[in-house]
Image: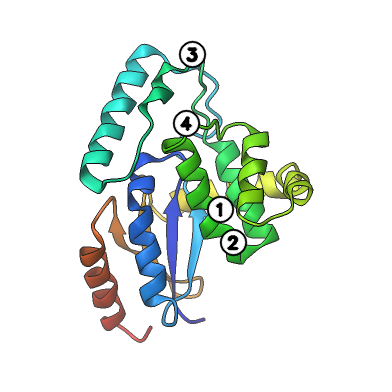
Amino acid sequence: MSSELLYIADPMCSWCWGFSPVIDAVRDHFQTQLPMRILMGGLRPGTTEPMGDGMKTDISGHWKHVQQATGQPFDLAFFDREGFVYDTEPASRGVVAVRRLEPDLVFDYLKRVQEAFYAMNRDVTDSEVLAEVSVESGLNREAFRAEFDTEETIRETWKDFELSRRLGVTGFPALLGGSNDRGYEVITAGYRPWGEVKELIEGWVKTGDR
């Protein structure tokens, strides 16, 4: 099997939102050389406790740091919400549903979910919001809702989380290279600007027959 890039992310990971323009550049630059797949990492799947003041303070600090480092927009009015449960499973499952329905649209959908959450303060733990975003990506709402609710999509989402851990990825974003036959290795983890990521991928390609 030829090599590919495996992008491990979470739709509700602020550094992944910061990394979104870099992923766009990676896809544009390497698309004829290296195919790319998305794997959901699972930041806080299955969370049931509402955010408290301490968590809000901690996360808002992260968001401000990401905004300063990357220039990506954030709507900090999010922290005025009361009782928000930061469960990243529904948004991750939405990405998996699109990956199953229309693989060519999955990167666009991920980016739109990130933008909806971070820049527009939309509640992407709500399946209706996720369905609205699917329409914005060009999918049929009813087809998305049906796929989102299937046992197969739920299982595949949790398999993504498990595979991410088996690959040794504990933080997002992460970009791995390799194949199912030969295994995967981390090319870069955490946020880096496009120029650095480009050099790292090119160095990885040169180390072997990709």
State the CA–CA distance, disc 1 to disc 3.
27 Å
SS at mark 2 in the image: helix
State the CA–CA distance, disc 4 to disc 1.
16 Å
Q: What residue is rendered at 52% in x and 81% in y?
A: 1
Looking at the rendered structure, the kind of residue marked 2 is Leu
Name the spot of residue 161 as percent of width and height, x first: 52, 46
- Between disc 4 and disc 1, the foreground one is 4
Q: What residue is rendered at 53% in x and 57% in y?
A: 108
Q: What residue is rendered at 66% in x and 35% in y?
A: 127
State the CA–CA distance, disc 2 to disc 1.
6 Å
Which quadrant holds residue 124? top right
Name the spot of residue 116 as percent of width and height, x first: 50, 40
Name the spot of residue 55 as percent of width and height, x first: 36, 20
Q: Which label was assigned to residue 109?
A: 1
The residue carrying mark 2 is 105
The residue carrying mark 4 is 121
Q: Earlier in the sequence, mark 4 or mark 2?
A: 2
SS at mark 4 in the image: loop
Q: Which label was assigned to residue 82?
A: 3
Q: Earlier in the sequence, mark 4 or mark 1?
A: 1
* Cβ atoms under marks 4 and 1 closer than 8 Å: no
**Number of residues whose C-alpha sits closer than 10 Å to that of mark 1, classed few (under 14), some (14–19) or many (20 or more):** many
Looking at the rendered structure, the kind of residue marked 1 is Tyr
Q: What residue is rendered at 44% in x and 64% in y?
A: 6
